[in-house]
Structure formats: structure tokens, C-alpha cells
Image: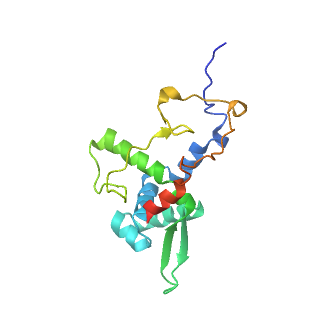
């Protein structure tokens, strides 16, 4: 019987990363704060002023992002009364997801490239589309994908989930966040 396997949508909610990610990042203000952090904002007043978000909503979202390890919250050394928020490694790892959502919005909702344009620092050319890639770097489409049970997955490669083919995924994300 050649029945196609599909993801168990209800039974596996506890073990699925998507609901967990949406619990942390699943509303627009969290992504707008994340985008602002990638753009170098660090202080409550900066986030509030630049985003135009109500203070109580901002305080709530910043608290959740800190609680989930996306941002750190530290008193500044020069003035212990002033608080600074910084992206963590976990927060920086959200860069591809944020860029994919932005590119999707530009293509399917607004119909134009947002300004400013994110470019490669080396040659100042726009970044390419965020794509799903195979373990060996090939671009995959929906037709190239299927669900497999863990025991049917070939894990013989050295690559860890989340590593870029060049092994520099996080470093690239952190450089882009600076």
C-alpha cells in the first residue's frame, strides 16, 4: 500500500516546534520588536518611540521575549537605572524566519520591496530569497518534500539541525544583527 505519510496535526502538537515557536513569536509586536533589535535598538524608550507601541504592550512583549530567551535584559554599567535589551543567540537564530516572512509579505501582500533594503555587506547587493534547502544545498520546492518517521530518516550526515551548509549560520545571523 503506497499511502503517503502526513504530519499528525493533532496528536503531535506537544512535540511540534511550530506551536512552540508561535507561542513565543506568534503576533506582530514580537516580530516588530525583534526587527527593531536587529536594527540596533536596545532601550525601552527607543522601541517605544520607533515602533509607536503602547508602553504597557511593549513592557509585556519585552518581558515575554526575555522570559523565552530571545532577548536579555541588563542594567547598563554606566547608569544602573537604564536597562538594555540585547539579542541572544536564540534571538539571532530567528533572523531567517523574520526575513522569510518579510519577503513573503513583499511578494504576496504589498507587492513591492520594503525600504531600506537588506543587502550583503560585502557587495551591497540585495539578499536572495530565503529558501528551503536539502542537506547538500539544493533548493527544494514543495514537490521535493515528504514526511518521514524518525526511524526512516537517514541521519548519517554530520550536519546538525539549523547549521548552514557552510557551518556559519549563526555567525552570519549575528553579523547581520550588528
Between 106 and 135, the one nearer to me in the picture: 135
Image position of 96 with respect to 7: above or below:
below
Query: What x and y, as percent, mark residue 153?
Result: 67, 33
Query: What x and y, as percent, mark residue 94?
Result: 50, 54
Between 73 and 58, the one nearer to me in the picture: 73
Image position of 120 with respect to 133: above or below:
below
Image position of 81 with respect to 109: above or below:
below
Between 157 and 93, the one nearer to me in the picture: 157
Residue 6 located left or right of residue 116: right
Image position of 143 with respect to 123: above or below:
above
Q: Is residue 52 visible?
A: no
Residue 168 located left or right of residue 39: right
Tell me the residue at 32%/40% (across/down). 107
Tell me the residue at 35%/44% (across/down). 105
Tell me the residue at 41%/57% (across/down). 32
Quadrant of the image occupied by residue 134:
top right
Task: Give the position of the N terminus as an image quadrant.
Answer: top right
The total number of labels drawn is 0
Query: What x and y, as percent, mark residue 163?
Result: 57, 49
Amino acid at each position: 500500500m503506497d499511502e503517503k505519510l502526513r504530519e499528525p496535526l493533532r496528536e503531535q502538537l506537544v512535540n511540534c516546534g511550530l506551536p512552540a515557536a508561535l507561542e513565543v513569536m506568534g503576533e506582530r509586536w514580537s516580530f516588530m520588536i525583534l526587527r527593531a533589535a536587529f536594527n540596533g535598538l536596545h532601550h525601552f524608550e527607543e522601541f517605544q518611540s520607533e515602533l509607536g507601541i503602547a508602553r504597557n504592550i511593549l513592557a509585556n512583549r519585552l518581558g515575554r521575549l526575555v522570559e523565552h530567551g530571545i532577548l536579555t535584559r541588563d542594567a547598563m554599567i554606566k547608569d544602573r537605572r537604564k536597562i538594555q535589551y540585547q539579542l541572544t543567540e536564540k534571538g539571532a537564530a530567528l533572523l531567517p524566519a523574520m526575513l522569510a516572512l518579510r519577503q513573503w509579505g513583499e511578494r504576496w501582500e504589498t507587492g513591492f520591496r520594503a525600504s531600506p533594503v537588506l543587502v550583503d555587506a560585502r557587495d551591497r547587493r540585495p539578499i536572495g530569497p530565503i529558501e528551503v534547502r536539502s542537506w547538500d544545498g539544493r533548493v527544494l520546492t514543495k514537490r521535493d518534500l515528504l514526511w518521514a518517521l524518525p526511524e526512516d530518516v537517514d541521519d548519517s550526515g554530520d550536519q546538525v539541525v539549523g547549521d548552514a551548509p557552510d557551518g556559519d549560520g549563526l555567525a552570519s545571523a549575528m553579523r547581520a544583527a550588528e
